[in-house]
């Protein structure tokens, strides 16, 4: 069953994927609340995880939102295209 503890340590990729799922749910809930009828059953608004050499990007609907440091697992907001914002951890 999804979300159940299975007795093993989650990998980095699993943690980032879970973070992306929670982020997507929160964003979709906010859009539904603020703009009723906009989403409906559409799959347009989705999170996307892209792993690179130093950071893993978590985007929503094609826009960058977060970057996760692959070495430490620290989550940052983004400053611009491919640039972390150390002030938003």
Image (tube, rainbow, N blue to C red):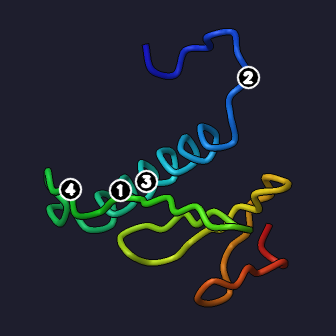
Quarter of the view holding residue 85: bottom right
Q: Is residue 60 left or right of residue 69?
A: left
The residue located at (33%, 66%) in the rendering is 34
| Cα gap from disc 2 to disc 1, whole angstroms | 29 Å
The residue located at (46%, 52%) in the rendering is 26
Q: Quadrant of the N terminus?
A: top left
The residue located at (55%, 40%) in the rendering is 18
Q: Which badge, 1 or 4, is on the more N-terminal residue?
A: 1
Residues at marks 3 and 4 touching, judged by CB atoms closer than 8 Å: no
Q: Which badge, 3 or 4, is on the more N-terminal residue?
A: 3
Q: Which of the two residues, 18 or 82, is positioned nearer the viewer here?
A: 82
Residue 56: x %, y % from top left: 63, 62
Quarter of the view holding residue 48: bottom left
Q: Which element is circle 3 on?
A: helix
Mark 3 or 1: the one toward you: 3
Q: Which residue is mark 4?
A: 43
| Cα gap from disc 2 to disc 4, whole angstroms | 31 Å
Mark 2 or 1: the one toward you: 2
Q: Which badge, 3 or 2, is on the more N-terminal residue?
A: 2
Res 24 label: 3
Q: Quadrant of the C terminus?
A: bottom right
Residues at marks 3 and 1 touching, judged by CB atoms closer than 8 Å: yes
Q: Which residue is mark 2?
A: 9
Q: Which element is circle 4 on?
A: loop
The residue located at (35%, 56%) in the rendering is 28
């Amino acid at each position: 069953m999804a979300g159940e503890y299975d007795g093993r340590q989650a990998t980095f990729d699993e943690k980032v994927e879970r973070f992306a799922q929670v982020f997507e749910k929160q964003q979709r809930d906010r859009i539904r609340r603020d703009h009723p009828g906009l989403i409906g059953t559409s799959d347009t608004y989705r999170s996307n995880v892209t792993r690179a050499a130093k950071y893993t990007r978590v985007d929503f609907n094609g826009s960058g939102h977060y970057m996760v440091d692959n070495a430490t697992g620290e989550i940052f907001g983004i400053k611009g295209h491919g640039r972390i914002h150390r002030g938003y951890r």
